[in-house]
Amino acid sequence: MAKFVLAGKANCPYFAKAELLADLLQRSLPKFSIHKLCMHPNEWQQWLETTCKENGWQHEYSPMIWRELINRGGKGMLLGGFSDFLEHVQAYYGITSDMTTELMMKIATENLLTRELCMKEEVYHQSLIKPLHIWISSALNPTCYILIPQLFAPGVFRDAPTISLHLLDVGAIEEDLQGVRMETEDLALPQLHKCGGEDEEESKVKVSERYEQYGRLIDERAHKNVAVIVAGNTLVNLKCSLLLENAPSVDSGHFVGMATQLEYEARAHIAQKLSVKTADVTDVIVWGNISGSSHVDLQRAKVFQYEGAIWGPSDFSQPVLKMIYDRKWLQTDFLNLVSSQRATVASKSQRATAISATNGIIAVLKAWNCNSSAEEVFSLGILSTGQYNLPAGVVFSMPVSFQDGRWSVLSDVIIGDEMRAKLQIAADQLREEKDLASRTRKDTA
């Protein structure tokens, strides 16, 4: 089998001549195959330079013709331009071309018109596709390797027919981002429309400067219904605050800091204490600074399937605080276990707690996309407007529920004097973080 590739500019008369000669050979010879790449003149030069660089070829004009060595496993063998192709055909097959110059020019004009029509059709069909755009910063973080496939799981973005994924990592090597892109494309996800690595020229920018910049980009370019989730191990509340402050045209309710991972870690230790599954513990609340001074609140927490003195059906629950009699454990060991959980897991596995981080993100995404009950409680860092007499203007973790694609703060949680003192400590810490970020920006201005 002789397989050739013919590439050239749509308006090139010699491409037209080579094309007709190749068609003749393909009709006449059962073992001759030709693949044609007809390009718009504006596309040609960049494509030519890239292809030659990848294959180690030297060629400077249209058309370019090479033979694919399909039976040898090697790279293609460059023949050259039209004259080289004609000479090869005459030597091997005894066939030549007698096309007139007038016909060559006519076909070249038709090729260009056809190519331009095809390009217009491609643009039109692309305009009909309205993908959901998802941007991931710190895309080389281990969490993203687990998160990306989960974004396409059923129930996460059920109303989005297609998704365009944009990967960003400050200071990352472009090849590393492209590697993640290629792995994502290898998943063959039906919902994936496009996946690309986005370049950023800044590599040593401070957190405050970086998230201010992200906020401005969101304000300028994102859809006003954008949903932004901030997750991680450091300065979660501050990052969320910087984003929403620098995106004033976007509703502040579209920005949340994720406390769900911390909430699930607390549930896991309670479940272990009560000898139940983690999923059997619900409605744990995390208040305050997600990656700093936070408070785990169990006043609404429930446990299912607990083998105690009272037993009921599968939907029967009991208050966690009534089932755990060891108050010393709750006030000391429990809090220490929760605060050190990620470090403990990382020391044992020698890697970041990516699975639990991903689980928390996906849980919030599903709830935000109308896939949770209104009774389910989540802990999210949101902009305080004075709820529970908390200071307004800071991003503070508090209990919310989702309904119809929107969250609302629970209004029936009791805050006693002891808890209020703890929340005040968290609020003071958050204000200090904001003040430090502000001073840093002024010092570098």
Image (cartoon, rainbow, N blue to C red):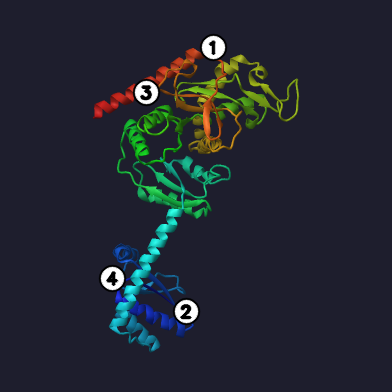
Label number found at residue 1: 2
Q: Secondary structure at mark 2?
A: loop
The three-letter code of the residue at mark 4 reads His
Q: Amino acid at mark 3?
A: Glu
What's the CA distance linking mark 2 and mark 3?
69 Å
Q: What separation in Å lies between label 3 and label 4 (alpha carbons)?
A: 59 Å
Residue that badge 4 annotates: 59
Looking at the image, the residue that sits furthest to the top is 417
Q: Counting residues from the N terminus, which is met first, the one under dot 2 or under dot 3?
A: 2
The answer for how far apart the CA atoms under marks 3 and 1 are is 26 Å
Residues 146 and 367: in front is 367
Q: Is residue 296 left or right of residue 316?
A: left
Q: Secondary structure at mark 1?
A: loop
Of label 3 and label 1, which has the lower sequence position? 1
The kind of residue on which mark 1 rests is Gly
Circles 3, 1 touching at the beta carbon (< 8 Å): no
Q: Earlier in the sequence, mark 1 or mark 2?
A: 2
Residue at 44 percent across and 21 percent down: it is 385
**Label 1: which residue?**
416
Residue 401 located left or right of residue 427: right
Say the numbered circle drawn on residue 433.
3
Q: Position of residue 259 (x, y in %)?
A: 50, 29
The C terminus is located in which quarter?
top left
Mark nearest the camera among 1 and 2 is: 1
Q: Verify CB contact (< 8 Å) between mark 2 and mark 3.
A: no
Marks 1/4: CA distance? 79 Å
